[in-house]
Image (tube, helix red, strand yellow):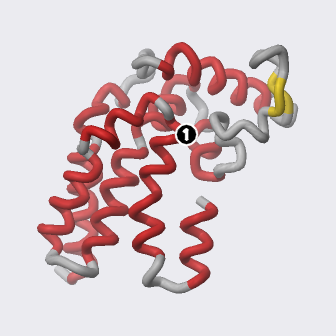
Amino acid sequence: ATARVKSARWAALVAAVSLLPVLGLFTTSRIFFVRDLSFFFWSRHLWLRHTIFSGQLPWWDPHVAGGQSAIADALNQIAMPLTLAIRLLPSDVVSFNLWVALPLPVAGVGTYAFLRARVPPAAAALGGCIFALSGPVISMLNAPNLSWSVAFIPWVLWSLSRGPLTIAIAFAT
């Protein structure tokens, strides 16, 4: 196998291992409910989906604090294309669980990509798993706005050696 195929296999291994703490993701009937996820983020998730699917733009959320700008609230992640696409997948439950769980493999594979230029593939894979499975990263899963920000840190670091366009894309995502 070519070096590219071997690298892809290592990255896939990192992604698979990083999903171990969130195996509950693979359900169509139960949501993650730790702390703020069920109390705060589930209702926002449903509101966003139902607003968009009813043909309205989600500029204003009438349910939070007597009404407030939804687009300006970073907790909604409306201006983040990747998370918005995930949250608009067909199922309320599946899209919510993916929104909560996917920062782990994104962080792990990003760390692998960043480290791969500096160390052998096995060491980069170990580093990706360690970062994705670290306490601070896993404990942030109950706040998707923070967990997605942390998940993209390795990608931003990786982009620094790739040129201005890649840096811009990494920051914009």
Seen in the picture, residue 78 relative to 35 is either above or below; the reply is below
Q: Secondary structure at mark 1?
A: helix
In the picture, which quadrant includes the C terminus?
bottom right
- Name the spot of residue 63 as percent of width and height, x first: 78, 16
Residue in front for this viewpoint, 43 or 12: 43
Seen in the picture, residue 169 relative to 34 is either above or below; the reply is below
Residue at the spot x=43%, y=83% of the render? 161
- Asked whether residue 55 is in view, the answer is no
- Name the spot of residue 8 as percent of width and height, x first: 27, 68
Please tell me in which quadrant of the rendered image residue 119 appears: bottom left
Residue at the spot x=51%, y=36% of the render? 144
Side of 172 relative to 148 (left or right)? right
Residue in front for this viewpoint, 110 or 91: 110
Please tell me in which quadrant of the rendered image residue 75 appears: top right
Q: Of the residues shown, which amino acid type is indicated by label 1?
A: Asn
- Asked whether residue 99 is in view, the answer is yes
Seen in the picture, residue 30 relative to 24 is either above or below; the reply is above
- Name the spot of residue 16 as percent of width and height, x first: 25, 48
Side of 166 relative to 108 (left or right)? right
Side of 168 relative to 137 (left or right)? right
Q: Name the residue beneath numbered marker 1.
A: 145
Within 10 angstroms of label 1, few (less than 14), some, or many (20 or more) residues? Answer: some
In the picture, which quadrant includes the N terminus?
bottom left
The number of numbered discs placed on residues in the rendered structure image is 1
Residue in front for this viewpoint, 53 or 121: 121
- Name the spot of residue 151 as percent of width and height, x first: 42, 52
Residue at the spot x=60%, y=32% of the render? 90
Side of 45 relative to 93 (left or right)? right
Residue at the spot x=54%, y=14% of the render? 39
